[in-house]
Image (cartoon, rainbow, N blue to C red):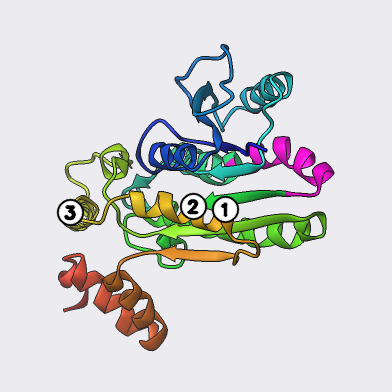
Amino acid sequence: MTRTALITGASSGIGKLTAETLANAGYRVIGTSRNAATDGEISVQGISMCQLDVCDDTSVATLKTRLEKAGSMPDLLVLNAGFGISGPIEETPVANAIEQFDTNVIGVHRVVRQFLPALRIKKRGRIIVIGSMLGRLALPFQAFYAASKSAVASYTEGLRMEVQPFGIKVSLIEPGDHQSDFGANRQQTSSESQSPYQPDCERALAIMDENERTGPSSQRVADMVLSVAKQPEPKVRYLCIQSSERNILWLKKLFSHARFERFVCKELGLTNIYN
């Protein structure tokens, strides 16, 4: 029987590559984006793009109804839609912080609420959430993004335990830096030219953008999604990171908090903080 995967945020980057990878593996893929068509036939094979705004309750409910009518309810949810904001915490408007959590955390919950009941009734299915390495490691000037990914990690772990009795497997994939348009789409929340944070913020974000630009292909993440989806007993969390990033997480465990802070700030060009 053909398996059906629903992938949020599938118009570019990791989501697009994941849609292509699953389709090549024989899945019928329902990819979503905010700008896709709201109607049209759902293909019995390959990739169909459907309109979905994970920040809109009505949009999520409408998609579920559309897929029910088409007989295309998913066996696999890949919850990838998200974005990042950057900038000093002091200068981040509350509205931007709310938007960050509404997309990266509550957006996941909106989709789960609509599609989980069908999986529970069938007593089978997979849910894979795309988190981030920054769910384990906060960085200066990306605190709200890191906090949202930490929150979604806790959400995923709790969900996994709740739905295990119904035969549903839940996992979190935590990518590090990969080549994508994520950095280009990151929203910087502060544009104050006289901000006391500006020099440090600009240096840090430039280094982060360079690490993403020179990172490995995002195909690694898409391949991991397929691998996790095929495993009979998947783990709760999977890191998809480079060896240098794995070393950073190891140092976080090894160093005192103060020593690790100095290390991070030096790596991001913030040496003036710890002279």
Q: Residue at x 59, y 60 (%)?
A: 231
Q: Secondary structure at mark 2?
A: helix
Query: In the current view of this chain or complex, which residue is farthest to the front?
Result: 1
For residue 229, which numbered disc appears in the image? 1
Q: Is residue 190 visible?
A: yes
Crowding around mark 3 (Cα neighbors within 10 Å: few <14, some 14 to 19, many 20+) is few
Q: CA distance from mark 3 to mark 2?
A: 25 Å
Is 164 placed above or below 65 here?
A: below
Residue 176 in picture, x, y percent from top left: 35, 60
Q: Secondary structure at mark 3?
A: helix
- What's the magenta region? 108-124
* Frontmost residue, 129 versus 155: 129
Q: Give the quadrant of the N terminus.
A: top right
Left or right, 151 with reference to 16: right
Three-letter code for the amino acid on which mark 1 is drawn = Ala
Quadrant in which residue 57 is drawn:
top right
Which secondary structure class fits the magenta region best? helix
Mark 3 sits on what residue? 210
Q: Give the quadrant of the C terminus.
A: bottom left
Three-letter code for the amino acid on which mark 3 is drawn = Glu
